[in-house]
Each structure stands twice: as C-alpha cells, then as structure tokens.
Amino acid sequence: MSSVTWKCPSNIALVKYWGKKGNQLPANPSISFTLSNCHTITTLSFKPKENDGTLLVSFAYDGQPMPSFEPKLEIFFNKVESLFPFLPGSILEINTTNTFPHSSGIASSASGMGALALCLCSLEKEIGNTLSDDDFYKKASIAARLGSGSASRSVHGPLSMWGQSNLYVGSSDEFAIQVDEVHDIFKTFCDTILLVDEGTKNISSSVGHSLLNNHPFAPARFEEANKNIESLKRALMIGDLILFNQVVEQEAMMLHAMMMSSNPYFLLMKPGTVAIIQKVWESRKQLGLNMTITLDAGANVHLLYPASERIKVQAFITKELAQYCSNNKFIHDQVGSGPIKMA
C-alpha cells in the first residue's frame, strides 16, 4: 500500500462565493486569502485490488474511524472517478486532522477537500501519469471543487480567484487560479479568527447555496459581486486599505443579508458576533488601526489587518474582543503561501 500526505490550508473569501449552478460551478467569481495556521493534514493510502471494480474507502479523523463522513466521500468519489481512472477497484484509507474546529464556519471543507484532491493527484503521478506543475494544481482545483466549491481556492496562495471574469486572464468556473498582481502589504496580511461559536452550524453551506435558486435578490447580489471583484482587484494591486475595507466588509454583510432574507430564512450570527463587529467599528478610528472584519457562513469573525499593526491589533483583541469568544478562544493566523506536500 502506497501513501501520500498533504497539508492544505483553509481560506477566507474576501468577495464571497454564495450560490451555484450546474455541476458545482459558482454563480459569481470569488477571491480569497489563503491562510497558514488553519490547515488540514491528510494522508491517503492506496492499494489496488482485483475485484468487481468497487472502490472501497475508509475514513479516520484524528485517528478515530468516522463512518458518518463516508456518505459525503462516496458522493465525492463518484464525481471524480472519471478524473482518476485508477480509482475503480482500489482500496483507499484516508486519515485526516484539522488545526481548527470542524464545521464552525472556518471552511474546514475547503482545506479538507483540497488536501484530499492534492493527495489523489500525487498518487496519479506515482502511478505514472505525468502532469506539469500547472496541470497538477489545475486538476487538483477541479477535483477539490467537486467536493466543496471553496476548496478549489485552497490549492493556491497567497491569494486565489475562482470563477470566470474578464478581469483575470485564465480564470474559469471549473478551477481557481493564483492571483499574482498583489501589493506587498497584502502578502503578509494577518487574520485572527475570533471563535464565537465552536459548534456545528445549524444549516449546511450546501443548503444555504441552494436557497439562492429562488431568492428574489439573487440577480442583484451576483451583479454586485462582479462589481466588487473589480474594486477589490484595484485595492489589491495598489495597496488601498480603505477600498479593501469597504469591499470586504460589504461582502460579509451582504452574505449574511442573503441568508436572513432567503426562504426559509436563517441566522448564523450570534450575539458575540454582533458585539465584536460593533466594537471593531467603534474602535478602529479612535485607535488609528486598519482592522477589517469578514465572516464566512458561520458565527466566527475574521479580523484582517496588516502585519505592521500586529502588536497593537492583537493587544486590542486580547483586551476588548476575547471576552465575546467561546472560552476567550481565538486563532492568530496570516496569509500563507499555499499547500505543502509532506510525504
């Protein structure tokens, strides 16, 4: 039995992916920071087996069998079998672990599916299918997307863009690309994740995406997202922190507004989420700090800020924001360079 191990980071979307079409394709393009400390480490062991062509998969999380994950994995492998012809008739053992809470709105599916897709591509290379580096990561992004849309972006860093846009050459709905035109200030940006709620979300992202199909505000949302892609690109290129703040915070508010106005409607923010947002908005001008809040589909708040302001912002977090977190817990992270093959 051969095996391969990849460490794949989570990511935090700046312009949000919310709503999809076709076979796990985005309704609008999105751009994300690739993180560093929040990552998944996955080891995939492979053994060919002569049988009726059935793929046998077992899954363990933190060393413990997790059969509850296997139905989702079965759906994923059904989708990617055509990409990886060596899969039918094989035995796969998946062992994975996260450095952050699962299913709490920090895109664990992005890092998890990204790591798994990278492992599959590495196994394919070992078996003898030669891929250039560009084709390797393109294929990994395609495969990851079929498991989780945002996972397509986790195979690149420090910034990644997914979805076809005339503003980015080579962009596609099928896979993510690396964003290279970035001012130096954003290459070392910090992200502190304030863990308001470490529990499982009360509604899955998949269900949330589906509710946009008949959402009365969906067309306007998709149009606004495309405008924000243009504004964010400009901010990222010239290092405009004010424009960056405006776009990213509007995107976060719009994401949750779409959730609260869908049918059925739902609310993922918690009282601590709102308290943190209000405290940041009240304090940043007074303190002279470039702090930007954003959220994924969950209650936890991502606080983004330049590395040059790390000491002051982190002191503010400890003094003013930690009290709103579950057990005063938060995770200091920063923009990372992307996934790493470990074995």
Image (spheres, rainbow, N blue to C red):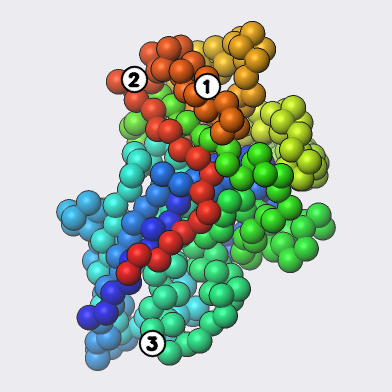
At label 3, the amino acid type is: Ile
Please provide percent x and percent y for residue 253.
64, 27
Q: Quadrant of the C terminus?
A: bottom left
| Whether residue 246 is situated above or below residue 140 in the rendered picture | above
**CA–CA distance in space, label 3 to label 2:** 48 Å
| Residue at the spot 26% in from the left edge and 61% down from the top edge | 95
Q: Residues within 10 Å of mark 2 (few under 14, many from 20)?
A: few
Q: Position of residue 294 (x, y in %)?
A: 58, 31
Considering only order in the chain, which callout, 3 or 1, is on the residue closer to the N terminus?
3
Mark 1: which amino acid? Val
According to the picture, the residue beneath numbered tag 1 turns out to be 313
Residue pointed to by mark 3: 127
As helix, strand or loop, the secondary structure at mark 2 comes to helix
Q: CA distance from mark 2 to mark 1?
A: 16 Å
Measure the alpha-carbon separation of dots 1 and 3.
48 Å
Q: Earlier in the sequence, mark 2 or mark 1?
A: 1
Tag of residue 328 = 2
Residue 76 or 242: which is nearer the viewer?
242
In the image, 204 versus 160, the foreground residue is: 160
Secondary structure state at the residue bearing disc 3: helix
Give the residue displayed 40% in from the left and 55% down from the top. Answer: 112
Question: Could you tell me if residue 141 is visible in this image?
Answer: yes
Q: Measured along the vertical axis of the image, is residue 105 above or below residue 158?
A: above
